[in-house]
Amino acid sequence: MTTLPELEIVAGAETHGGPQLPRVVGFMESDFAPLVYAAVRECVGDPRSEHLLVGVGDRVAIVLGSQRFDTVTLELSVEHVNRGRVNPILFYQAVPTAVLGQIARDYRLTGPVSCVAVIGDARAEVLELARVLLADGGAEWVLGLTVEMHPDPALGFASADLVRADPGWAERRGPS
Amino acid sequence: MTAEVFVSGFGVFSAFGFGPDALLAGAFTGSPAFRPVTRFDVSHCRADRAATWQEADGYFLDGRQGGGTVEVASDCGRQALAMAGWRDPAELPVILATKLRAPSLEPEPAAGTTERVADRLGLGKPRRTFVNACCAATNAIIHGAQLVSTGVTEAVLAGGAFLVDRQAFSLFDAAQALAVDGRLRPFDQDRQGVLLGDGAAMLLLESGESLRARGAEPLARLAGWAMTDDAFHVAKPHVEGAGVAAAVTGALRRAGIGPDRLTYVNAHGTGTPFNDAAEAAGLHAALGDHTETVFVSGTKSTTGHALEASGALESVISLLAIRSSVLPPTAGLHRPDTRHPLRHVSAPERVDVPYALSLNSSVGGVNAAILLAAA
Protein backbone atom coordinates (compact mmCIF):
# COMPACT_ATOMS: atom_id res chain seq x y z
CA MET A 1 0.00 0.00 0.00
CA THR A 2 1.74 3.15 -1.18
CA THR A 3 1.92 6.21 1.05
CA LEU A 4 3.45 8.75 -1.32
CA PRO A 5 2.32 12.35 -0.76
CA GLU A 6 0.70 14.69 -3.22
CA LEU A 7 2.92 17.68 -3.93
CA GLU A 8 2.47 21.34 -3.22
CA ILE A 9 4.41 23.41 -5.76
CA VAL A 10 5.76 26.35 -3.79
CA ALA A 11 7.55 28.07 -6.67
CA GLY A 12 8.47 27.33 -10.27
CA ALA A 13 10.46 28.78 -13.15
CA GLU A 14 11.64 28.05 -16.70
CA THR A 15 14.74 29.44 -18.34
CA HIS A 16 15.82 29.41 -21.98
CA GLY A 17 19.28 29.45 -23.50
CA GLY A 18 20.92 32.10 -25.62
CA PRO A 19 23.32 35.02 -25.27
CA GLN A 20 21.34 36.62 -22.43
CA LEU A 21 22.06 33.68 -20.15
CA PRO A 22 24.42 34.67 -17.30
CA ARG A 23 27.58 32.55 -17.24
CA VAL A 24 28.58 30.52 -14.19
CA VAL A 25 32.16 31.06 -13.04
CA GLY A 26 34.30 27.96 -13.62
CA PHE A 27 32.09 26.46 -16.32
CA MET A 28 33.12 26.94 -19.95
CA GLU A 29 31.62 26.41 -23.40
CA SER A 30 28.32 24.79 -22.54
CA ASP A 31 24.98 26.39 -21.56
CA PHE A 32 24.20 23.38 -19.31
CA ALA A 33 25.40 24.80 -15.98
CA PRO A 34 24.18 28.36 -16.72
CA LEU A 35 20.71 27.04 -17.64
CA VAL A 36 20.36 24.98 -14.46
CA TYR A 37 21.72 27.77 -12.28
CA ALA A 38 19.47 30.40 -13.87
CA ALA A 39 16.36 28.24 -13.41
CA VAL A 40 17.17 27.81 -9.70
CA ARG A 41 17.79 31.53 -9.26
CA GLU A 42 14.54 32.37 -11.04
CA CYS A 43 12.65 29.87 -8.89
CA VAL A 44 13.94 30.55 -5.38
CA GLY A 45 15.74 33.91 -5.67
CA ASP A 46 19.34 35.04 -5.88
CA PRO A 47 21.64 33.24 -3.41
CA ARG A 48 22.84 36.60 -2.05
CA SER A 49 19.27 37.71 -1.31
CA GLU A 50 16.60 36.62 1.17
CA HIS A 51 15.77 33.62 -1.02
CA LEU A 52 13.18 30.92 -0.33
CA LEU A 53 15.66 28.40 1.03
CA VAL A 54 17.24 30.52 3.74
CA GLY A 55 17.32 28.54 6.98
CA VAL A 56 16.04 25.25 5.55
CA GLY A 57 19.11 24.15 3.54
CA ASP A 58 19.66 20.96 5.54
CA ARG A 59 16.14 19.79 4.65
CA VAL A 60 16.29 20.44 0.90
CA ALA A 61 16.96 17.69 -1.65
CA ILE A 62 17.96 18.39 -5.25
CA VAL A 63 16.83 16.13 -8.11
CA LEU A 64 18.01 16.91 -11.65
CA GLY A 65 16.42 15.08 -14.58
CA SER A 66 17.32 15.11 -18.26
CA GLN A 67 17.34 12.90 -21.32
CA ARG A 68 20.94 13.53 -22.40
CA PHE A 69 22.34 15.99 -19.85
CA ASP A 70 25.31 18.14 -21.00
CA THR A 71 25.73 16.99 -24.59
CA VAL A 72 27.94 19.99 -25.42
CA THR A 73 30.57 19.18 -22.77
CA LEU A 74 30.30 15.43 -23.40
CA GLU A 75 30.95 15.95 -27.14
CA LEU A 76 33.74 18.42 -26.40
CA SER A 77 35.43 15.83 -24.20
CA VAL A 78 35.20 13.29 -27.06
CA GLU A 79 36.86 15.79 -29.43
CA HIS A 80 39.64 16.38 -26.91
CA VAL A 81 40.23 12.66 -26.35
CA ASN A 82 40.28 12.00 -30.11
CA ARG A 83 42.92 14.65 -30.73
CA GLY A 84 44.95 13.41 -27.75
CA ARG A 85 44.92 16.69 -25.81
CA VAL A 86 42.33 16.86 -23.08
CA ASN A 87 41.60 19.99 -21.07
CA PRO A 88 41.71 18.75 -17.45
CA ILE A 89 38.78 20.98 -16.49
CA LEU A 90 36.51 18.65 -18.48
CA PHE A 91 37.24 15.98 -15.86
CA TYR A 92 34.62 17.48 -13.58
CA GLN A 93 32.60 19.61 -15.99
CA ALA A 94 31.40 16.48 -17.80
CA VAL A 95 29.80 15.33 -14.54
CA PRO A 96 26.24 16.59 -13.91
CA THR A 97 26.71 16.85 -10.14
CA ALA A 98 29.33 19.58 -10.62
CA VAL A 99 26.85 22.43 -11.13
CA LEU A 100 24.64 21.02 -8.39
CA GLY A 101 27.64 21.27 -6.06
CA GLN A 102 27.92 24.93 -7.00
CA ILE A 103 24.21 25.48 -6.32
CA ALA A 104 24.44 23.57 -3.02
CA ARG A 105 27.38 25.73 -1.96
CA ASP A 106 25.80 29.06 -2.92
CA TYR A 107 22.41 28.28 -1.31
CA ARG A 108 23.86 26.23 1.61
CA LEU A 109 21.93 23.09 0.68
CA THR A 110 23.24 19.98 2.48
CA GLY A 111 20.51 17.43 1.66
CA PRO A 112 20.47 14.56 -0.89
CA VAL A 113 21.51 15.28 -4.50
CA SER A 114 20.33 13.00 -7.32
CA CYS A 115 20.58 12.97 -11.10
CA VAL A 116 18.18 10.82 -13.08
CA ALA A 117 18.30 10.11 -16.82
CA VAL A 118 14.93 9.74 -18.52
CA ILE A 119 13.44 8.79 -21.87
CA GLY A 120 10.16 10.67 -21.65
CA ASP A 121 8.92 13.55 -19.48
CA ALA A 122 11.81 14.60 -17.23
CA ARG A 123 9.66 16.88 -15.06
CA ALA A 124 7.14 14.12 -14.32
CA GLU A 125 9.95 11.74 -13.37
CA VAL A 126 11.66 14.34 -11.17
CA LEU A 127 8.42 15.10 -9.35
CA GLU A 128 7.76 11.38 -8.83
CA LEU A 129 11.23 11.06 -7.25
CA ALA A 130 10.39 14.05 -5.08
CA ARG A 131 7.32 12.23 -3.75
CA VAL A 132 9.45 9.22 -2.83
CA LEU A 133 12.08 11.39 -1.12
CA LEU A 134 9.46 13.27 0.87
CA ALA A 135 7.68 10.06 1.90
CA ASP A 136 11.03 8.59 3.03
CA GLY A 137 11.68 11.57 5.27
CA GLY A 138 15.14 12.39 3.93
CA ALA A 139 13.99 15.89 2.98
CA GLU A 140 11.13 18.29 3.61
CA TRP A 141 11.60 20.28 0.43
CA VAL A 142 12.72 19.16 -3.02
CA LEU A 143 14.24 21.40 -5.66
CA GLY A 144 13.18 19.52 -8.79
CA LEU A 145 15.18 20.50 -11.88
CA THR A 146 15.12 19.52 -15.54
CA VAL A 147 17.40 20.57 -18.38
CA GLU A 148 17.63 19.77 -22.08
CA MET A 149 20.25 21.08 -24.46
CA HIS A 150 19.45 21.84 -28.12
CA PRO A 151 21.66 22.35 -31.20
CA ASP A 152 20.15 25.87 -31.34
CA PRO A 153 21.24 27.29 -27.96
CA ALA A 154 18.16 29.52 -27.79
CA LEU A 155 15.99 26.39 -27.68
CA GLY A 156 17.83 24.87 -24.75
CA PHE A 157 15.84 25.15 -21.55
CA ALA A 158 15.79 24.31 -17.87
CA SER A 159 12.99 24.23 -15.33
CA ALA A 160 12.93 24.40 -11.55
CA ASP A 161 10.14 23.49 -9.13
CA LEU A 162 10.37 23.92 -5.38
CA VAL A 163 7.97 21.39 -3.90
CA ARG A 164 6.95 19.96 -0.54
CA ALA A 165 4.41 17.40 0.61
CA ASP A 166 0.82 18.55 0.63
CA PRO A 167 0.38 19.86 4.19
CA GLY A 168 -2.59 17.55 4.76
CA TRP A 169 -0.60 14.42 3.82
CA ALA A 170 1.16 13.75 7.09
CA GLU A 171 -2.11 14.23 8.95
CA ARG A 172 -3.99 11.85 6.66
CA ARG A 173 -1.15 9.31 6.72
CA GLY A 174 -1.37 8.99 10.50
CA PRO A 175 1.42 7.85 12.81
CA SER A 176 4.32 6.00 11.18
CA MET B 1 4.03 2.81 8.09
CA THR B 2 7.49 1.98 6.73
CA ALA B 3 8.55 -1.53 5.76
CA GLU B 4 11.89 -3.08 6.68
CA VAL B 5 14.11 -3.67 3.64
CA PHE B 6 16.15 -6.84 3.11
CA VAL B 7 18.62 -8.06 0.49
CA SER B 8 17.46 -11.45 -0.74
CA GLY B 9 19.77 -11.92 -3.71
CA PHE B 10 22.61 -10.28 -5.59
CA GLY B 11 24.73 -10.62 -8.66
CA VAL B 12 28.20 -9.18 -8.87
CA PHE B 13 30.92 -8.62 -11.46
CA SER B 14 34.40 -7.16 -11.14
CA ALA B 15 37.82 -7.48 -12.71
CA PHE B 16 38.01 -10.80 -10.83
CA GLY B 17 35.07 -12.12 -12.88
CA PHE B 18 31.44 -12.92 -12.15
CA GLY B 19 30.01 -14.03 -8.82
CA PRO B 20 30.88 -13.78 -5.13
CA ASP B 21 33.52 -16.54 -5.19
CA ALA B 22 35.68 -14.54 -7.61
CA LEU B 23 35.38 -11.49 -5.36
CA LEU B 24 36.17 -13.49 -2.22
CA ALA B 25 39.27 -14.94 -3.90
CA GLY B 26 40.40 -11.50 -5.08
CA ALA B 27 39.28 -8.49 -3.02
CA PHE B 28 39.02 -10.45 0.22
CA THR B 29 42.61 -11.72 -0.06
CA GLY B 30 43.96 -8.26 -0.90
CA SER B 31 45.05 -9.18 -4.44
CA PRO B 32 44.96 -6.14 -6.74
CA ALA B 33 43.41 -6.82 -10.16
CA PHE B 34 45.31 -4.07 -12.01
CA ARG B 35 46.92 -4.94 -15.33
CA PRO B 36 48.02 -3.12 -18.48
CA VAL B 37 45.01 -1.87 -20.43
CA THR B 38 44.53 -3.78 -23.68
CA ARG B 39 40.97 -2.91 -24.73
CA PHE B 40 41.97 0.51 -26.11
CA ASP B 41 45.15 2.43 -26.87
CA VAL B 42 46.73 4.12 -23.85
CA SER B 43 50.10 4.91 -25.43
CA HIS B 44 49.36 8.67 -25.26
CA CYS B 45 48.38 8.52 -21.58
CA ARG B 46 50.48 9.01 -18.44
CA ALA B 47 49.03 5.87 -16.80
CA ASP B 48 48.57 2.47 -18.41
CA ARG B 49 46.77 0.26 -15.88
CA ALA B 50 43.24 -0.50 -14.79
CA ALA B 51 41.41 -3.38 -13.15
CA THR B 52 39.81 -4.88 -16.23
CA TRP B 53 38.33 -8.31 -16.78
CA GLN B 54 40.12 -9.49 -19.89
CA GLU B 55 37.14 -11.35 -21.31
CA ALA B 56 35.19 -8.07 -21.34
CA ASP B 57 37.73 -6.63 -23.82
CA GLY B 58 35.62 -8.24 -26.56
CA TYR B 59 32.89 -5.68 -26.00
CA PHE B 60 35.30 -2.98 -27.19
CA LEU B 61 36.67 -4.66 -30.32
CA ASP B 62 34.27 -2.90 -32.68
CA GLY B 63 34.74 0.47 -31.02
CA ARG B 64 31.52 0.40 -29.01
CA GLN B 65 31.72 2.45 -25.83
CA GLY B 66 28.87 1.20 -23.71
CA GLY B 67 28.18 -2.16 -25.28
CA GLY B 68 29.23 -4.29 -22.34
CA THR B 69 27.22 -2.39 -19.76
CA VAL B 70 23.95 -4.03 -20.76
CA GLU B 71 25.56 -7.47 -20.78
CA VAL B 72 27.19 -7.29 -17.34
CA ALA B 73 24.17 -5.59 -15.73
CA SER B 74 21.86 -8.24 -17.20
CA ASP B 75 24.12 -11.07 -16.03
CA CYS B 76 24.24 -9.60 -12.53
CA GLY B 77 20.45 -9.19 -12.55
CA ARG B 78 20.04 -12.82 -13.59
CA GLN B 79 22.37 -13.94 -10.76
CA ALA B 80 20.37 -11.88 -8.25
CA LEU B 81 17.01 -13.33 -9.35
CA ALA B 82 18.38 -16.89 -9.23
CA MET B 83 20.00 -16.42 -5.81
CA ALA B 84 16.77 -15.01 -4.38
CA GLY B 85 14.61 -17.66 -6.06
CA TRP B 86 12.46 -14.87 -7.51
CA ARG B 87 10.08 -16.29 -10.09
CA ASP B 88 8.23 -13.39 -11.65
CA PRO B 89 10.59 -10.64 -12.86
CA ALA B 90 7.67 -8.73 -14.43
CA GLU B 91 6.67 -7.69 -10.90
CA LEU B 92 10.04 -6.01 -10.27
CA PRO B 93 10.90 -2.37 -10.89
CA VAL B 94 14.55 -1.83 -11.84
CA ILE B 95 16.87 0.99 -10.80
CA LEU B 96 20.22 1.13 -12.61
CA ALA B 97 23.23 3.40 -12.27
CA THR B 98 25.18 3.94 -15.44
CA LYS B 99 27.39 6.40 -17.27
CA LEU B 100 26.38 9.38 -19.39
CA ARG B 101 27.96 9.29 -22.83
CA ALA B 102 28.15 11.71 -25.74
CA PRO B 103 25.55 10.99 -28.47
CA SER B 104 28.35 10.56 -31.03
CA LEU B 105 29.73 7.65 -28.99
CA GLU B 106 26.46 6.17 -27.81
CA PRO B 107 23.34 7.17 -29.75
CA GLU B 108 21.15 5.52 -27.13
CA PRO B 109 20.48 7.72 -24.06
CA ALA B 110 21.50 6.42 -20.64
CA ALA B 111 17.92 5.48 -19.75
CA GLY B 112 17.88 3.29 -22.85
CA THR B 113 20.54 1.10 -21.23
CA THR B 114 18.16 0.45 -18.33
CA GLU B 115 15.34 -0.33 -20.76
CA ARG B 116 17.48 -2.90 -22.56
CA VAL B 117 18.53 -4.58 -19.30
CA ALA B 118 14.90 -4.62 -18.17
CA ASP B 119 13.70 -6.06 -21.49
CA ARG B 120 16.34 -8.80 -21.43
CA LEU B 121 15.29 -9.89 -17.96
CA GLY B 122 11.55 -9.30 -18.45
CA LEU B 123 11.45 -6.78 -15.61
CA GLY B 124 8.53 -4.49 -14.80
CA LYS B 125 8.21 -0.77 -14.06
CA PRO B 126 9.21 1.80 -13.07
CA ARG B 127 12.61 1.63 -14.75
CA ARG B 128 14.88 4.36 -13.42
CA THR B 129 18.42 5.44 -14.24
CA PHE B 130 20.74 7.28 -11.86
CA VAL B 131 23.75 9.09 -13.27
CA ASN B 132 25.08 11.12 -10.33
CA ALA B 133 28.69 10.04 -10.86
CA CYS B 134 30.41 8.04 -8.10
CA CYS B 135 27.27 8.08 -5.92
CA ALA B 136 24.95 6.85 -8.69
CA ALA B 137 24.77 3.17 -7.69
CA THR B 138 24.50 3.99 -3.99
CA ASN B 139 21.66 6.34 -4.94
CA ALA B 140 20.04 3.61 -7.06
CA ILE B 141 20.08 1.19 -4.11
CA ILE B 142 18.82 3.87 -1.71
CA HIS B 143 16.00 4.76 -4.10
CA GLY B 144 15.13 1.07 -4.40
CA ALA B 145 15.08 0.81 -0.61
CA GLN B 146 12.83 3.88 -0.44
CA LEU B 147 10.37 2.30 -2.89
CA VAL B 148 10.15 -0.78 -0.64
CA SER B 149 10.09 1.07 2.68
CA THR B 150 7.32 3.44 1.56
CA GLY B 151 5.23 0.59 0.18
CA VAL B 152 5.42 1.55 -3.50
CA THR B 153 6.66 -1.98 -4.26
CA GLU B 154 7.32 -5.22 -2.38
CA ALA B 155 10.62 -5.81 -4.17
CA VAL B 156 12.97 -4.09 -6.60
CA LEU B 157 16.18 -4.85 -8.48
CA ALA B 158 18.77 -2.08 -8.00
CA GLY B 159 22.45 -1.59 -8.75
CA GLY B 160 24.87 -0.32 -11.36
CA ALA B 161 27.32 -1.25 -14.08
CA PHE B 162 30.51 0.26 -15.49
CA LEU B 163 33.25 -1.00 -17.78
CA VAL B 164 36.51 0.91 -18.10
CA ASP B 165 36.41 2.71 -21.45
CA ARG B 166 38.70 5.00 -23.39
CA GLN B 167 36.73 8.14 -22.66
CA ALA B 168 36.66 7.78 -18.87
CA PHE B 169 40.30 6.64 -18.78
CA SER B 170 41.47 9.59 -20.90
CA LEU B 171 39.59 12.20 -18.83
CA PHE B 172 40.97 10.86 -15.55
CA ASP B 173 44.43 10.63 -17.08
CA ALA B 174 44.31 14.21 -18.39
CA ALA B 175 43.37 15.44 -14.92
CA GLN B 176 46.47 13.62 -13.61
CA ALA B 177 44.16 11.70 -11.30
CA LEU B 178 45.44 8.22 -12.24
CA ALA B 179 48.25 6.50 -10.31
CA VAL B 180 51.18 6.13 -12.70
CA ASP B 181 52.76 3.50 -10.46
CA GLY B 182 49.83 1.17 -11.19
CA ARG B 183 48.78 0.90 -7.55
CA LEU B 184 45.74 2.40 -5.81
CA ARG B 185 46.68 2.94 -2.16
CA PRO B 186 43.89 4.63 -0.17
CA PHE B 187 44.99 6.36 3.04
CA ASP B 188 48.69 5.70 2.31
CA GLN B 189 51.15 8.59 2.42
CA ASP B 190 52.81 7.30 -0.76
CA ARG B 191 49.61 7.08 -2.83
CA GLN B 192 49.79 8.40 -6.37
CA GLY B 193 46.13 8.52 -7.29
CA VAL B 194 43.14 6.48 -8.37
CA LEU B 195 42.82 3.66 -10.93
CA LEU B 196 39.65 2.63 -12.72
CA GLY B 197 38.07 -0.82 -12.58
CA ASP B 198 35.29 -2.83 -14.21
CA GLY B 199 32.40 -3.37 -11.84
CA ALA B 200 28.72 -4.16 -11.63
CA ALA B 201 26.26 -5.44 -9.07
CA MET B 202 22.50 -5.82 -8.86
CA LEU B 203 20.73 -6.37 -5.53
CA LEU B 204 17.24 -7.73 -5.04
CA LEU B 205 15.70 -5.62 -2.26
CA GLU B 206 12.58 -7.00 -0.67
CA SER B 207 10.18 -6.32 2.19
CA GLY B 208 9.92 -8.69 5.13
CA GLU B 209 6.31 -9.36 4.23
CA SER B 210 7.27 -10.46 0.74
CA LEU B 211 10.02 -12.73 2.09
CA ARG B 212 7.62 -14.36 4.53
CA ALA B 213 4.94 -14.79 1.87
CA ARG B 214 7.23 -16.76 -0.38
CA GLY B 215 9.13 -18.53 2.40
CA ALA B 216 12.49 -17.05 1.45
CA GLU B 217 15.43 -16.15 3.69
CA PRO B 218 17.17 -12.75 3.61
CA LEU B 219 20.92 -12.40 3.17
CA ALA B 220 21.13 -9.10 5.05
CA ARG B 221 18.98 -6.19 6.16
CA LEU B 222 19.36 -2.72 4.68
CA ALA B 223 19.18 -1.02 8.05
CA GLY B 224 19.91 2.59 7.14
CA TRP B 225 20.84 5.01 4.42
CA ALA B 226 21.49 8.71 3.92
CA MET B 227 22.60 11.15 1.24
CA THR B 228 24.08 14.59 1.84
CA ASP B 229 25.95 17.37 0.09
CA ASP B 230 29.03 19.21 1.38
CA ALA B 231 27.74 22.61 0.12
CA PHE B 232 31.41 23.49 -0.12
CA HIS B 233 32.98 23.34 -3.59
CA VAL B 234 32.14 22.37 -7.15
CA ALA B 235 34.86 19.69 -7.35
CA LYS B 236 36.70 19.39 -4.03
CA PRO B 237 35.35 17.63 -0.92
CA HIS B 238 34.77 19.54 2.30
CA VAL B 239 38.16 19.69 4.07
CA GLU B 240 36.72 18.43 7.37
CA GLY B 241 34.43 15.90 5.71
CA ALA B 242 31.24 17.59 6.90
CA GLY B 243 29.04 15.90 4.31
CA VAL B 244 30.65 12.49 4.89
CA ALA B 245 30.03 12.83 8.62
CA ALA B 246 26.40 13.82 8.06
CA ALA B 247 25.83 10.83 5.72
CA VAL B 248 27.34 8.35 8.21
CA THR B 249 25.39 9.87 11.11
CA GLY B 250 22.18 9.87 9.08
CA ALA B 251 22.50 6.19 8.13
CA LEU B 252 23.24 5.17 11.74
CA ARG B 253 20.36 7.29 13.05
CA ARG B 254 17.93 5.77 10.61
CA ALA B 255 18.99 2.30 11.82
CA GLY B 256 18.56 3.41 15.42
CA ILE B 257 22.11 2.50 16.42
CA GLY B 258 25.12 4.43 17.66
CA PRO B 259 28.66 4.24 16.28
CA ASP B 260 29.53 1.75 19.05
CA ARG B 261 27.53 -0.91 17.16
CA LEU B 262 29.31 -0.36 13.84
CA THR B 263 32.00 -2.92 12.98
CA TYR B 264 33.21 -2.03 9.50
CA VAL B 265 33.26 0.83 7.00
CA ASN B 266 33.96 0.19 3.34
CA ALA B 267 35.39 3.62 2.55
CA HIS B 268 35.13 5.46 -0.76
CA GLY B 269 38.96 5.46 -0.55
CA THR B 270 40.03 6.67 -3.97
CA GLY B 271 43.70 7.07 -3.12
CA THR B 272 43.64 10.81 -3.79
CA PRO B 273 44.89 13.09 -1.00
CA PHE B 274 41.82 15.39 -0.95
CA ASN B 275 39.28 12.56 -0.82
CA ASP B 276 41.16 10.39 1.65
CA ALA B 277 41.73 13.29 4.04
CA ALA B 278 38.11 14.48 3.89
CA GLU B 279 36.77 10.98 4.35
CA ALA B 280 39.01 10.24 7.34
CA ALA B 281 38.07 13.57 8.92
CA GLY B 282 34.40 12.88 8.31
CA LEU B 283 34.62 9.44 9.88
CA HIS B 284 36.26 10.95 12.96
CA ALA B 285 33.51 13.56 13.21
CA ALA B 286 30.75 10.94 12.91
CA LEU B 287 32.24 8.13 14.99
CA GLY B 288 34.02 10.14 17.70
CA ASP B 289 35.91 7.93 20.15
CA HIS B 290 34.60 4.84 18.36
CA THR B 291 36.86 5.65 15.38
CA GLU B 292 39.47 3.62 17.26
CA THR B 293 37.32 0.50 17.18
CA VAL B 294 35.63 0.61 13.76
CA PHE B 295 37.53 -1.26 11.03
CA VAL B 296 38.00 0.65 7.76
CA SER B 297 39.20 -0.54 4.37
CA GLY B 298 39.28 0.81 0.84
CA THR B 299 38.61 -2.07 -1.53
CA LYS B 300 39.16 0.04 -4.63
CA SER B 301 42.79 -0.89 -3.87
CA THR B 302 42.00 -4.30 -5.39
CA THR B 303 38.92 -3.75 -7.61
CA GLY B 304 39.73 -0.28 -8.92
CA HIS B 305 37.18 2.53 -9.04
CA ALA B 306 34.03 1.42 -10.88
CA LEU B 307 32.73 5.04 -10.95
CA GLU B 308 28.92 5.01 -11.34
CA ALA B 309 28.79 1.33 -10.27
CA SER B 310 31.17 1.53 -7.32
CA GLY B 311 28.44 1.83 -4.67
CA ALA B 312 26.77 -1.36 -5.85
CA LEU B 313 30.02 -3.34 -6.01
CA GLU B 314 31.06 -2.10 -2.58
CA SER B 315 27.64 -2.76 -1.04
CA VAL B 316 28.04 -6.38 -2.14
CA ILE B 317 31.58 -6.45 -0.68
CA SER B 318 30.15 -5.12 2.61
CA LEU B 319 27.40 -7.75 2.50
CA LEU B 320 29.99 -10.48 1.89
CA ALA B 321 31.97 -9.19 4.89
CA ILE B 322 28.86 -9.71 7.04
CA ARG B 323 28.13 -13.14 5.55
CA SER B 324 31.71 -14.47 5.61
CA SER B 325 32.92 -12.77 8.84
CA VAL B 326 36.03 -11.71 6.93
CA LEU B 327 37.02 -8.09 6.36
CA PRO B 328 38.60 -7.30 2.99
CA PRO B 329 41.86 -5.33 3.33
CA THR B 330 43.21 -2.14 1.84
CA ALA B 331 45.95 -3.51 -0.41
CA GLY B 332 49.36 -1.86 -0.42
CA LEU B 333 48.81 0.16 2.75
CA HIS B 334 52.25 0.51 4.36
CA ARG B 335 52.49 4.10 5.64
CA PRO B 336 48.98 5.20 6.75
CA ASP B 337 48.14 8.89 7.01
CA THR B 338 48.82 10.14 10.51
CA ARG B 339 46.28 12.98 10.58
CA HIS B 340 42.84 11.52 11.44
CA PRO B 341 44.18 7.97 11.94
CA LEU B 342 41.81 5.09 11.25
CA ARG B 343 41.71 1.41 12.31
CA HIS B 344 42.81 0.10 8.92
CA VAL B 345 42.35 -3.44 7.71
CA SER B 346 45.74 -4.02 6.09
CA ALA B 347 45.41 -7.82 5.86
CA PRO B 348 42.27 -10.01 5.72
CA GLU B 349 40.77 -10.05 9.19
CA ARG B 350 38.33 -12.59 10.65
CA VAL B 351 35.72 -10.87 12.79
CA ASP B 352 31.94 -10.99 13.33
CA VAL B 353 30.29 -8.14 11.43
CA PRO B 354 26.79 -7.29 12.69
CA TYR B 355 26.78 -3.92 10.90
CA ALA B 356 28.78 -2.74 7.85
CA LEU B 357 28.60 0.66 6.20
CA SER B 358 29.41 1.38 2.55
CA LEU B 359 30.36 4.98 1.82
CA ASN B 360 30.70 6.90 -1.46
CA SER B 361 31.32 10.50 -2.51
CA SER B 362 31.36 12.29 -5.83
CA VAL B 363 32.08 15.54 -7.65
CA GLY B 364 29.83 18.33 -6.40
CA GLY B 365 30.24 17.30 -2.77
CA VAL B 366 27.66 14.51 -2.97
CA ASN B 367 27.90 11.78 -0.30
CA ALA B 368 25.92 8.58 0.15
CA ALA B 369 25.98 5.89 2.84
CA ILE B 370 24.32 2.50 3.07
CA LEU B 371 24.24 0.58 6.35
CA LEU B 372 23.84 -3.20 6.08
CA ALA B 373 23.02 -5.44 9.02
CA ALA B 374 23.22 -9.18 9.54
CA ALA B 375 19.77 -10.64 8.83
Image (cartoon, coloured by chain):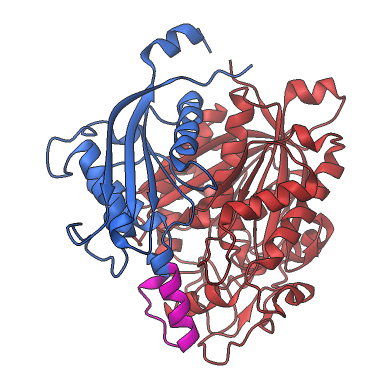
Q: Which residues are magenta?
A: A74-90
Question: How many tags in the picture?
Answer: 0
Farthest residue toward the bottom?
B43
Indicate the position of residue A161 as horizontal and vertical percent values.
33, 35
Q: In what quadrant of the picture does the N terminus of chain A appear?
A: top right
Residue A157 vertical placement versus B171 (above, below): above
In the rendered structure, the answer to whether residue B180 lies left or right of residue B203 reads left
What hue does chain A carry in this figure? blue
From what the image shows, is residue A42 above or below residue B192?
above
**In the image, is B242 to the left or to the right of B373?**
left
At which x and y percent is residue B365? 38, 53
**Residue at (45, 27) in percent of width and height:** A134
Identify the residue at horizontal 52%, vertical 53% (top origin). Answer: B131
Q: Position of residue B75 (x, y in %)?
A: 79, 55
Q: Confirm whether the magenta stretch covers residue A85.
A: yes
Q: Name the colour assigned to chain B in the rendering.
A: red
Residue closest to the eye, B108 or B139: B108
Q: Is residue B325 visible?
A: no
B82 horizontally vs B241: left or right: right
User: Do we see residue A172 in this rendering?
Assistant: yes
How far across and down, in percent of the image, does residue B294 sit?
57, 47
The residue depicted at 43 percent of the width and 81 percent of the height is: A80
Whether residue B47 appears in magenta in the rendering, the answer is no
